[in-house]
Image (tube, rainbow, N blue to C red):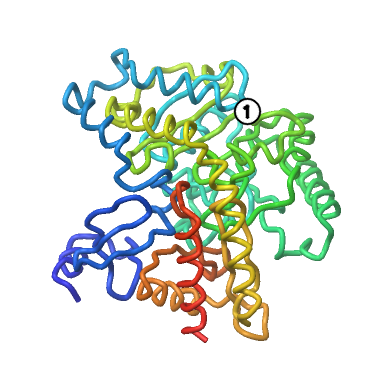
Amino acid sequence: MSSLHHRHLAVSPEWLALYYRHPLEITHGEGRHVWDADGNRYLDFFGGILTTMTAHALPEVTKAVSEQAARIIHSSTLYLNRPMIELAERVASLSGIPDARVFFTTSGTEANDTALLLATTYRRSNQILAMRNSYHGRSFSAVSITGNNAWSPTSLSPLQTLYVHGGVRTRGPYAHLSDEEFTAACVADLEDLLGHTRTPAALIAEPIQGVGGFTSPPDGLYGAFREVLNRHGVLWISDEVQTGWGRSGEHFWGWQAHAQNGPPDILTFAKGIGNGMSIGGVVARAEVMNCLDANSISTFGGSPVTMAAGLANLSYLLEHDLQGNARRVGGLLIERLRAIGVTSERVREVRGRGLMIGIELVRPGTDEADPEAAAAVLEAAREGGLLIGKGGGHNTSVLRIAPPLSLAIPEAEEGAEILADALRAVG
């Protein structure tokens, strides 16, 4: 055990997770690579949990942060804040939500917490619909709507949560159905559920479930849900903390794959917009955002420094068409990984879109999740010079791949080859 690891254990909670048998201290990064304290170089296919969205040490972002920090670091939302207003204007325009208002937070958890406050206040209901296998953050309210018991440490809750089918396409009672039949069955389930309960405030859903292992329903499912929700006056919250900003390649926001009945009422975002800086936020149409009848501020949300980073990062993303790069390079990578998966009895499924890819592992000859194999592949990939993540529903048996959106084709090929070697090493 390293001295730093020993010091970590001495002052940190036991439940604060660390990757790897010998945890890694990352000291610096550049582009799609990072280095550890021993000087080892790694290709980064996880980006600080989908947070380093464009590149490590992106000059445009570091310059914006440095220049803003030299002027003023903090003022709070009690004062006019030019970078915050400029970023809010851009996010509102990109959101697709009419008459949009934007509130900045410091994390995705806080963004979802704010969305729940808005929805329950607007609808005068503490009942929330959430998806099975979901994850929405670590606050008391966010944990209470998380449909993944590995990340839900308490059953106590300020909300009454009801869980809906549909977030996982290839497991569960509807897995055998066609996409059209799957959608119809999930809509019927939602209709039936609403017939047995008081009217909920909102449905919150990740278009692609992140911690759940990059699972998703057929396109159009949440749009079909929207027809039902609209009849009952239930709001739709799209949790875009991991799916936003073009990571899926096909769409800028995950909700756009389900857009036949319009945009969500509330959209939450975080992670990639700051490229490592702490930015989260909520977008909602004005009547929903303005429903609170008490004062509120954010001490650190909308910080001039983080807003400067967000503006520079978003500009780089749009000017360099990183969504298009995610579509092109991600498409090549997922096909390469599927070809590798065919050769391994442990690979049940390779799924995802753009640069948001999951590899689900099972025990050979069964359909049973294999978290031990996932942990072993994670270790083997690190030994080969590649950092990836892991997740999944009932068991953590999905390898999560989410590189910066500037990933180059040779880097994608290199990462795929290291993963192939890691899978072979595990056997």
* Viewer-side residue, 289 vs 316: 316
Quadrant in which the N terminus appears: bottom left
Q: In percent of the image, x 59 and y 24: which residue is there?
A: 122
- Tell me the SS state at disc 1: loop
Q: Identity of the amino acid at label 1?
A: Asp
User: Front-most of 120 and 250?
Assistant: 250
- Graded by Cα atoms within 10 Å as few (under 14), some (14 to 19) or many (20 or more), the crowding at tag 1 reads many
Instruction: Tell me if 275 is positioned left or right of 400 in this view.
Output: left
- Residue 91 image point, x, y percent: 49, 26
x, y percent for residue 56: 33, 48
Image coordinates of residue 235 in percent, x first then y, are: 65, 31
Q: Is residue 290 left or right of residue 175?
A: left
Residue 371, compared with residue 275, is above or below; it is below
Q: Which residue does the numbered mark 1 point to in the structure image?
A: 265
Residue found farthest to the top: 80
In this rendered view, identify the residue nearer to me: 284 or 387: 387
Residue at coordinates 56% horizontally, 16% vertically from top-left?
286
- Residue 341's image quarter? bottom right
Q: Is residue 256 above or below residue 12?
A: above
Q: Position of residue 30 (x, y in %)?
A: 30, 51
Q: Residue at x 30, y 58 (%)?
A: 34
- Residue at 43 percent of width and 64 percent of height: 388
Q: How many numbered tags mark residues here? A: 1
Q: Is residue 358 left or right of residue 63?
A: right
> Looking at this rendering, what residue extends furthest in the front direction?
410
